[in-house]
Amino acid sequence: MEAKAGVREHKLNILDREQASITGITKVISLEEEQICVITDKGKITIKGVNLHAGKLDVGSGVLEFTGQVDSVVYTECKTAGQKAAGAFGRLFK
């Protein structure tokens, strides 16, 4: 697979729901014991579980490794400020 210019590829690996790594991270939103939220060029990833602990975090290279029980992984689209504003104005002027 080829990455588009300026877009980082990312990879999510989970081993036995107990060890995981994510590459291609551009921003870490939260690292908590029950939830990890990160931003990639492909959207936001929210991982929910129990006893989630970061083992390695290198935002410069976009790598996060963690352990714990992974219960769910959800991808959502990240909206820019312009998209949010357009949505609000769109509702006002319908």
Image (cartoon, rainbow, N blue to C red):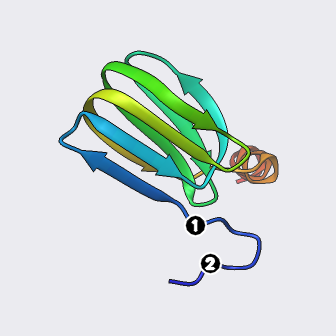
Q: Residue at x 48, y 26 (%)?
A: 54
Quadrant of the image occupied by residue 18: top left
Left or right: residue 85 versus residue 59 is right
Tell which residue pokes out farthest to the bottom in this image: 2
**So how many labels did they put on this image?**
2
The x and y percentages for residue 74 are: 38, 44
Residue at mark 1: 9
**Residue type pointed to by label 1:** Glu
Mark 1 packing: few (<14 Cα in 10 Å), some, or many (20+)?
some
The x and y percentages for residue 13 are: 35, 52
Closer-to-camera residue (83/35):
35
The x and y percentages for residue 27 are: 68, 40
**Residue type pointed to by label 2:** Ala
Above or below, 36 against 79 in this view is above
**Mark 1 element type:** loop
Is mark 1 in CB contact (under 8 Å) with mark 2? yes
Left or right: residue 19 versus residue 22 is left
Real-space Cα separation, disc 1 to disc 2, in angstroms: 6 Å
Residue at mark 2: 3
Work out which quarter of the rendered image holds the C terminus and state it. Answer: bottom right
- Label disc, if present, on residue 50 of the rendered structure: none
Sequence order check: which comes first, mark 1 or mark 2? 2
**Mark 2 element type:** loop
